Image: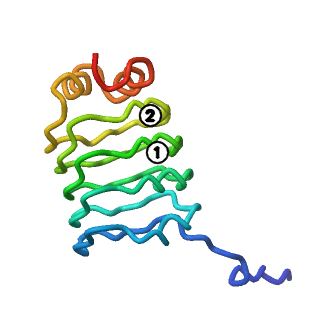
Amino acid sequence: SERPSNKATEVQEWKGLSLDGHGYISLSSAIFNYKHLHELFIGSNKLLAIPPTIGTLRNLRVLDLSTNNVSELPAELGMCTHLEKLYFFDNNIRTLPRELGSLSELQMLGVQGNPLDSTLKQMIIDSGTKALILHLRENGPSK
């Protein structure tokens, strides 16, 4: 009979990181060394900003920064071109950077609970995430 392979010696790389609900007011720069991350959950904290270095996490598929005190998304988020789900429910975001137009794989954008520009909000309601991303790519955040 064959010997089973020793799976224990294979490197298992973790793909997700959850820092939800810890009361953080800022993110450690060390987080941005985890270039392999697919999912980052940083919701229910007291974050005031998302640092531009978020753009180094090019493998992100899911980013949830809901229930914080963030007032704007960094333009560098547009470098996370594999993002499929971006949630920022219950923050203070009024507009979206034009650079989010490069998020062509984005399927779900969670915006409720933000004082988001009514034109952008209505576009999401009427036409969906893909239409909003196309609008940002072609026109920027406002008409």
Q: Give residue 108's position: percent from left, percent from top.
A: 35, 39
Q: Quadrant of the N terminus?
A: bottom right
Residue located beneath label 2 in the image: 99
Give 60 or 108, whichever is nearer the viewer: 60
Give 105 or 50, whichever is nearer the viewer: 50
Would residue 114 appear left or right of 104 to someone viewing this image? left
- Identify the residue at image location x=23%, y=41%: 111
Give 103 or 138, whichever is nearer the viewer: 138
Would residue 17 appear left or right of 47 to someone viewing this image? right
Cα distance between the residues tagged 2 and 1: 7 Å
Q: In terms of image quadrants, where is residue 44?
A: bottom left
- Identify the residue at image location x=44%, y=45%: 77
Give amino acid for label 2: Glu
The answer to whether the residue labelled 2 contacts the one labelled 1, judged by CB atoms less than 8 Å apart, is yes
In the image, residue 95 above or below residue 47: above
Q: Which element type, helix, strand or loop, lies under badge 2?
A: helix
Return the disc, 2 or 1, that comes first in the chain's sequence: 1
The disc at residue 76 is 1
- Identify the residue at image location x=35%, y=55%: 50
In the image, residue 118 above or below residue 41: above
Q: Give residue 94's position: percent from left, percent from top.
A: 20, 37
Would residue 122 appear left or right of 132 to someone viewing this image? left
